[in-house]
Amino acid sequence: MSALLDSFATAFDGLAQREAADLGAHRRKALDAALRDGMPGPRSEAWKYTSLRALERRAFASPAPREIDADALDAALADVPFPRMVFVDGRHDAARSNVSAIVMPGIEVQPLSQVLREGEPRDANFLARIFAGADEVFANLNAALAEEGAVIRLDRECGDVFPLHLVFVASGRQPDAAVHMRHFIDMRMHSMLTVVEHHLALGEHRGLSNHVFHMHVGEGARLAHVRVQGEAAGATLIARSDAVLARRAHYDRLDLELGAALSRHELNVRLEGGLARLAASGVLFADGKRHVDTRLGIDHIARDTACDLFWRGLATDRGRAAFHGGIVIREGADGSNANLSNKNLLLSSQAEIDTQPVLVIHADEVQAAHGATVGQLDPTALFYLRTRGLPETEARALLTTAFCREALNIVAAGPMRDALTAMLDARLAGATGP
């Protein structure tokens, strides 16, 4: 057994709520599956561009309660408005959370730890899912070890009042800590919700975060979801988001991958109801020696469903970005419309980008298109800006930020897009290439 899995098996024995909500047997089964399958290697198609050899030699400990730099934490949260749920080192920070503005009849927002303490098996049954794939090791580890997260339930006809911010903070006080968090969003008919995820670090650390999101978007419901990943430069973040869309459901999503030494995000969406719509976009930014991997698995199951996927990648220094855009249109899903665009900029001769669009069609009468490119800044555009008097560095910066900003168009113009634009621009500053 690898040191990584051995440390997780030790953490399992120390879980405080391992048996809560009748989940003990499910947790043990998930851990056994992870230990049996081991870490996925290069022969795993899903992991062929992301090596885990260095990670599996490391051991992680469960986060212990430690004194946090309160001033630094409050400063980091200063720009995150309410309503919000704050989690620090995998624990719910009730003092810095406030969701009272959106909690009303038909809307429930709870930390997972509270759901487990109440012990009602039906409320926590999403944790009983076992992941059958041999390369779904992190998902099974999450099923075995997660005791905290956000649980959000909306009854029918509940509309969103404000965006709900979910803030995950690594304090850096325990450099090699591992955090496993499970989140669940259940939206009934014609409900609406906007969720913004923030992944922050107060200081440098080499910890690991393992997040799994489940989302059920009911008939006619609409979910807008923004995720900003700005983890510490030495951190490892493994994330998985699974969404199921019912008839006429809409799911709009933006992912900004801007931090962590190793970042891997898997987005799986099942379009199970007719006329369901997915619009998703994102930016992958790999600088230094960072490795950023995003893998999409979009499954058109019902008729007349649609997806529009728009991703931009940027790699400089010795960074590496990997993107897999998988779309399957099943037999019977006639009338589906699927579009994928993935364009990438290489700003260094030592950087690397791997992109793999995959389109599998088993239905007739569909419209589908996909495209992926890897290139450099347009010399004609660069020359034009130089002729207008811009220094080369400024011209490169202008083209680079404009290239990535296109992904933000999925967010309506307004304060949120302005904040995301400022965040993206700040992170890209200096990434202009030679």
Image (cartoon, rainbow, N blue to C red):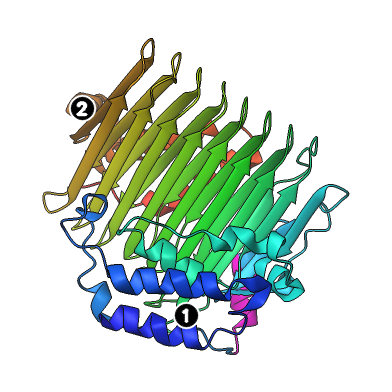
Residue 319 coordinates in the image, percent (x, y) = 22, 56
Task: Please say whether residue 154 is visible from this viewpoint.
Answer: yes
Residue 172 image label: 1
Residue 74 within the segment the image draws in magenta: yes
Q: Mark 1 Cα within 10 Å, few/some/many (few <14, many 20+)?
A: many
Residue 383 image label: 2
Task: Please say whether residue 398 is visible from this viewpoint.
Answer: no
The Cα atoms of the two marked residues, 1 and 2, are separated by 44 Å
Residue drawn where x is 46% and y is 84% of the image: 11
Image height check: is 203 above or below 305?
Answer: below
Pick whichever of labels 1 and 2 is earlier in the sequence. 1
Q: Label 2 near label 1: C-beta < 8 Å?
A: no
Q: Main secondary structure of the magenta part?
A: helix
Residue 338 coordinates in the image, percent (x, y) = 40, 23
Image height check: is 19 above or below 229?
Answer: below
Residue 18, by quadrant, is: bottom right
Residue drawn where x is 27% and y is 70% of the image: 38
Relative placement, left or right, of 233 versus 279 is left
Residue 350, by quadrant, is: bottom left
Q: Hey, which residue is sitting farthest top in the picture? A: 365
What amino acid is labelled 1 in the image? Gly
Image quarter where the N terminus lies is: bottom left
Residue drawn where x is 20% and y is 46% of the image: 353
Residue drawn where x is 53% and y is 31% of the image: 272
Q: What segment carries the magenta color? A: 67-76
Towards the viewer: 23 or 142? 23
What amino acid is labelled 2 in the image? Phe
Towards the viewer: 295 or 171? 295
Helix, strand or loop at disc 1? loop
